[in-house]
């Protein structure tokens, strides 16, 4: 558990209230837009999102069995999932996609180029659907806006989604924050934002030089400082939650990320938290 840091209005994900699913799929008024960070980091990423009618995973980068275990820990039923949305083909985002899709008969949404790059890892998937970055699409009641991000994958995507006047913005695995990224993240109620590394820890750390260059580069990962700059540009009075994601376990600490990125929050009402690799976050409700 990450200690709360009141100076930056920080609240650990696990300290927020759990809102368990009922046995039956919840009705909209009792249970609206909700998010659970199942895992985040270079060993696997998965986010649960539900509007009360439609429930999806954004990436499934742990083993299928581990994702199932983490869902059930939060009283979320994998049988109630409607789809898996894939941001890009790196293993830490797709490791469990094939297994979960086959086990629960889930359609998988990804761009055509990502599909081409991921196909050998995913094996047989019955129901593959393609989206295009820049073109909104629907999964049942959820409208998804995928947008291009700068990362060393075939066609990497960030996402925003809106429901009941609330908006979720997701941008992890990006080397730079382009104007496209900023436009899509503006007006978010909840932001899931990469804070991958502390630049000094990265330079002094154990990684080989080419890997350090890759992480620092325009198609690598956002540092704490870059994440802070991006947050400064998109923060607004209606931003309720910021979850820092994809932290490096070698080149960052939750405390450094919270302290640095927290400087971008000045309104006293935005909660800042860190998503971790080994612990499932709480279920956050946006309304
Ligand atoms: Zn990743
Ligand atoms: Zn990646």
Image (cartoon, rainbow, N blue to C red):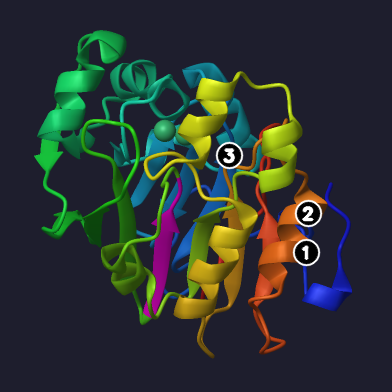
- What residue appears at the point 51 percent right and 35 percent down from the top-left corner? 215
- Marks 2 and 1, how far apart in space? 5 Å
Residue 117: image location, x then y, percent: 21, 20
Number of residues whose C-alpha sits closer than 10 Å to that of mark 1, classed few (under 14), some (14–19) or many (20 or more): some
Number of residues whose C-alpha sits closer than 10 Å to that of mark 2, classed few (under 14), some (14–19) or many (20 or more): some
The numbered dot on residue 21 is none
User: Which segment did they paint magenta?
Assistant: 166-172
Helix, strand or loop status at disc 3: loop
* Residue 125 occupies quadrant: top left
Residue 263: image location, x then y, percent: 70, 75
> CB under 8 Å between callouts 2 and 1?
yes
- Marks 1 and 3, how far apart in space? 19 Å
Is 227 situated left or right of 120 in this image?
right
Q: Ligand 1 near label 3 (Cβ, under 8 Å)? A: no
**Magenta highlight: main SS:** strand
Query: On the image, numbered disc 2 is attached to which residue?
Result: 256
The numbered dot on residue 40 is 3
- Depicted 269 relative to depicted 263: above or below: below
The residue nearer to you, when weighing 208 against 255, is: 208
Number of residues whose C-alpha sits closer than 10 Å to that of mark 3, classed few (under 14), some (14–19) or many (20 or more): many
Query: On the image, numbered disc 1 is attached to which residue?
Result: 259
Q: Is residue 177 visible?
A: yes
């Amino acid at each position: 558990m990450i200690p709360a840091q009141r100076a930056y209005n920080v609240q650990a994900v696990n300290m927020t209230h759990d809102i368990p699913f009922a046995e039956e799929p919840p009705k909209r008024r009792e249970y609206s837009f909700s998010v659970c960070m199942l895992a985040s980091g270079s060993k696997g990423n998965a986010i649960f999102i539900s509007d009360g009618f439609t429930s999806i995973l954004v990436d499934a980068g742990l083993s299928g069995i581990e994702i199932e275990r983490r869902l059930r820990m939060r009283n979320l039923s994998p049988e109630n999932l409607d789809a898996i949305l894939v941001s890009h083909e790196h293993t830490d985002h797709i490791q469990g996609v094939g297994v979960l899709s086959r086990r629960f008969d889930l359609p998988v949404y990804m761009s055509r180029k990502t599909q081409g790059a991921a196909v050998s890892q995913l094996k047989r998937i019955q129901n593959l659907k393609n989206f295009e970055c820049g073109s909104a699409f629907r999964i049942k009641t959820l409208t998804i806006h995928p947008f291009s991000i700068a990362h060393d994958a075939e066609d990497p995507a960030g996402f925003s989604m809106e429901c009941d006047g609330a908006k979720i913005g997701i941008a992890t695995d990006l080397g730079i924050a382009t104007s496209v990224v900023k436009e899509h993240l503006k007006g978010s109620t909840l932001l899931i934002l990469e804070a991958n590394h502390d630049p000094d820890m990265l330079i002094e750390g154990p990684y080989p030089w080419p890997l350090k260059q890759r992480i620092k580069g325009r198609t690598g990962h956002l540092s704490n400082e870059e994440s802070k700059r991006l947050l400064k540009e998109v923060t607004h009075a209606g931003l309720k939650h910021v979850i820092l994601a994809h932290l490096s376990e070698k080149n960052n600490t939750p405390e450094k990320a919270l302290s640095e990125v927290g400087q971008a929050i000045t309104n006293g009402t935005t909660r800042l938290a860190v998503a971790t690799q080994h612990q499932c976050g709480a279920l956050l409700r946006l309304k």
